[in-house]
Image (cartoon, helix red, strand yellow):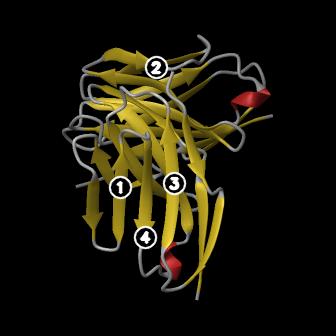
Amino acid sequence: KAGVTQTPRYLIKTRGQQVTLSCSPISGHRSVSWYQQTPGQGLQFLFEYFSETQRNKGNFPGRFSGRQFSNSRSEMNVSTLELGDSALYLCASSLSDNEQFFGPGTRLTVL
Amino acid sequence: GENVEQHPSTLSVQEGDSAVIKCTYSDSASNYFPWYKQELGKGPQLIIDIRSNVGEKKDQRIAVTLNKTAKHFSLHITETQPEDSAVYFCAAGNTGFQKLVFGTGTRLLVSP
């Protein structure tokens, strides 16, 4: 069974731009969570979607948003990029309670 | 909110030795505790997890123990191998909520 896939793997943007990242969960998984990983703050929860609805949200500004489609694929969007948004963005999918399987991540660099 | 502390931040062992990584959590409502291994350039890989109704769980060379009273849990790796070298993260969560709160990570180096 294929794992979680994320596209693109690498992205370079400039301050003020916006970016959209994509995540395809493991087949059959309906929950998709997003995390930000940085050397300074570690792994931090952004939000979680289940059946196209946001169920949980972390403590990130409104510039960070997401959505989920009927096929469980998810996208996250960051508007008005700041230098501090440079990070590895990880997507995790889940079938049952809590067990989360991560994708390889999208490395975003903001210049 | 939940806070997870993880120690040590780095751990160097010789091949064949055991390695122990410890975590503490603050929220007594947390009842799910996974451990992830992250290799360079990859996403975290779930290696073992434990729920609060169990005190210990083992999978080949890896074991996890949980002390709910003291709010701490530990990862034990026996007979370490060079391929065990990676960054290990503990996390805490609550059944029904997919949000995981992660520790700061332990860089494990296993020397041949």
Query: Would you place residue B9 above or below residue A65 in this image?
Result: below
**Mark 3 vs mark 1, CA separation in Å:** 10 Å
What label sits on residue B65 in the rendered view?
A: 1
Q: Earlier in the sequence, mark 4 or mark 3?
A: 3
Mark 4, secondary structure of its residue:
strand
Are tags 2 and 1 found on a single chain?
no
The residue at 50%/42% (across/down) is B24
Are tags 2 and 4 found on a single chain?
no
Q: Nearer the viewer, mark 2 or mark 4?
A: 4
**Mark 2 vs mark 1, CA separation in Å:** 36 Å
The chain letter under disc 2 is A
Are tags 2 and 3 found on a single chain?
no
Are tags 4 and 3 found on a single chain?
yes
**Mark 1 vs mark 4, CA separation in Å:** 12 Å
* Percent position of residue A25, x then y: 32, 39
**Mark 4 vs mark 3, CA separation in Å:** 12 Å
The chain letter under disc 4 is B
Residue A14 in sight from this viewpoint: no
Question: At label 2, which amino acid type do we have?
Answer: Gly
Q: Which residue is mark 2?
A: A66
* Percent position of residue A32, x then y: 35, 31
The residue at 35%/49% (across/down) is B66
The answer to the question of whether label 2 and label 4 lie on touching residues, with beta carbons closer than 8 A, is: no
Mark 1, secondary structure of its residue:
strand
Question: At label 1, which amino acid type do we have?
Answer: Thr
> Callout 2: few (<14), some (14-19), or many (20+) C-alpha neighbours within 10 Å?
many
Q: Which residue is mark 3?
A: B22
